[in-house]
Amino acid sequence: MDVKLHDIGEGMSEGEIVQLLVKPGDHVLVDQPLVEVQTDKVTAELPSPFAGKVETIYVEAGEVIEVGGTLLTISPIPQHAEQTLLPNRKKRILAAPFTRKIARENNVDIEEVKGTGPAGRITDEDVFRHLATTQKPEEKETEKAIEKEAKERTIPFSTRRKQISAKMKKSTLTIPHVTHFDEVDVTNILEMKKAMKEGKGQSISVAAFYIKAVCVALKEFPIFNSELSEEEGLIYLKPDLHIGLATDMEEGLIVPVIHHCDRLSINEIHKKMKSLHKAAMNSELTSKDLSSGTFTISNAGPLGSTGATPIINYPEAALLAFHKTKKMPVVKENDEIIIRSIMSISMTFDHRIADGGTSMRFTNRFIELIEQPSLLLTELV
């Protein structure tokens, strides 16, 4: 029976074969991983739908295959005979797809690596530790010599980069982008964050406060939580606030989503951010984690960004970016000069559905909420 590539993510049309986990002649059980596939959103292992013997494999690592394409064929065995495969089945290696990628790139057989994570899970550090203890001195010398003779090289235009490219082109060619810049005095919110840590022992990311303020502002300006259909002549105002978090990854930008963000407290938003970040780092995000976003934020400040003109995450209507916070002198009304923590922001919006004045009123409301954090106190529960 044929095993085909099915849709493992919203809107998926194709996937790149990262690694084959079986070979012809192998006996497999139900749900045993067969291949590792990468899409523009996730890297996932495709499990076997039934038990049997692998007869033919039609794909190879690095090949891009469309949804519905045949990956391999398996000769099924009767259900009562599955138990006979158990003694011959290899122990499953627990490792995230990104960890497996590190092993492949360094020619490390992951089955030889000792895992130190939970239940023997192999971590990135385990692979590097194994590499350091097994690499021969002459190999290290060869690597040094190669480095001295560095030449121009090429790298694959990966499936994820192709998907990002297609989406960015569609966004920029479809949406007339406008970006305006502003500054926010975040001194009070930083002091509140510090007080919460000292008083209640709560260490909450300042980005969680920003996201909560975004949710409050979006309820007052729902036009930026919308989607335009020019064909129908309608703007769909989304009833739910699903906030996407632009996340920088080695393989390319991804946008995990905090669903129903407006229903969460600041502490709950913080916890959800941490869990999504951890899942992203371990390549464990699900298709649900990466779908249905209605508005995206980009927290570029920790990387040192002082400003940008972000591209909207099509088909959304806007994106708000937080940039670097700097201590700056500020002149008060009585001409007194004080030092405050000032953060730059940039708001990109779809000029078809809103004008600059509306965008500025939206960011003014966001600024008000951040500069007067007492307005967010009712949201802390």
Image (spheres, helix red, strand yellow):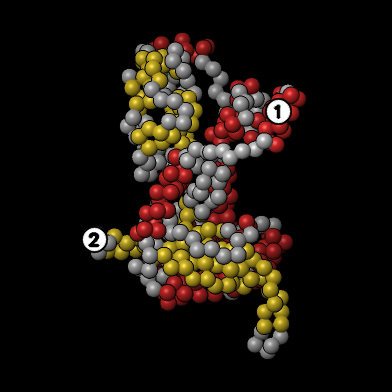
Please give the residue where the numbered disc 2 appears in the rendered image. 232
User: Looking at the image, is mark 2 or mark 1 earlier in the sequence?
Assistant: 1
**Image quarter hosting the N terminus:** top left
Q: Nearer the viewer, mark 2 or mark 1?
A: 1
Graded by Cα atoms within 10 Å as few (under 14), some (14 to 19) or many (20 or more), the crowding at tag 2 reads few
Residue 311, percent across and down? 45, 59
Q: How many marks?
A: 2
Q: Is residue 171 above or below residue 47?
A: below
- Tell whether 239 sits left or right of 256: left
Q: Is residue 246 above or below residue 41?
A: below
Amino acid tagged 1: Thr
Q: Is residue 196 above or below residue 138?
A: below
Give residue 185's mark. none
Q: Going 39% across and 62% down the picture, which residue do you hit?
A: 317
Query: Which element carries disc 2, helix, strand or loop?
Result: loop
- Tell whether 3 sits left or right of 362: left
Give residue 142's mark. 1
**Image quarter hosting the C terminus:** bottom right
From mark 2 to mark 1, how far is it between C-alphas?
63 Å
